[in-house]
Amino acid sequence: MAKNRVTTHLMCEECKERNYTQVVSKKRSAGSLKLSKFCSRCRKHQAHKETK
Ligand SMILES: [Zn+2]
């Protein structure tokens, strides 16, 4: 059913807090994605890196 899905996290590059989780296709390699997201610990938008 969900065999081709894997959960990844979006980690704040500043404080290393994992603020977001997302489910992506397994075929997509992790670690390639970088997004600007709001970090609740930094209390501002930070670059978030995809991690496992
Ligand atoms: Zn942060």
Image (cartoon, rainbow, N blue to C red):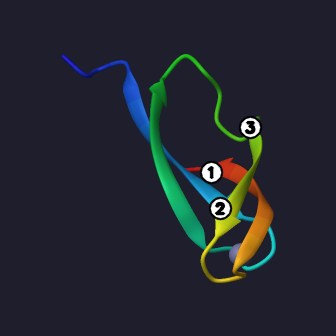
For marks 3 and 2 on the same chain, the one whose residue lies earlier in the sequence: 2
Residue 25 x %, y %: 48, 21
Q: How many marks?
A: 3
Q: Is residue 6 above or below residue 49?
A: above
Residue count near mark 1 (Cα–Cα under 10 Å), binned few <14, some 14–19, many ≥20: some
Q: Is residue 30 above or below residue 44?
A: above
Q: Is residue 26 above or below residue 17?
A: above
Q: Which residue is mark 3?
A: 33
Q: Which residue is mark 2?
A: 11
Q: In the visual, does 1 lie left or right of 28?
A: left
Nearer mark to the viewer, of 1 and 2: 2
The image quarter in which residue 1 lies = top left
Are dots 1 and 2 in contact, CB under 8 Å? yes
Q: Is residue 46 above or below residue 8?
A: below
Check disc 2 and give the amino acid type: Met
Check disc 1 and give the amino acid type: Thr
Q: In the visual, does 30 lie left or right of 9?
A: right
Task: Identify the residue shown where x is 48% and y is 28%.
Answer: 24
Check disc 3 and give the amino acid type: Leu
Residue count near mark 2 (Cα–Cα under 10 Å), binned few <14, some 14–19, many ≥20: many
Residue 43 x %, y %: 69, 80
In the image, which disc is placed on residue 7?
Answer: none
For marks 1 and 2 on the same chain, the one whose residue lies earlier in the sequence: 2
Residue 36 x %, y %: 77, 51
Task: Identify the residue shown where x is 76% and y is 35%.
Answer: 32
Q: Which residue is mark 1?
A: 51
Q: Secondary structure at mark 1?
A: strand
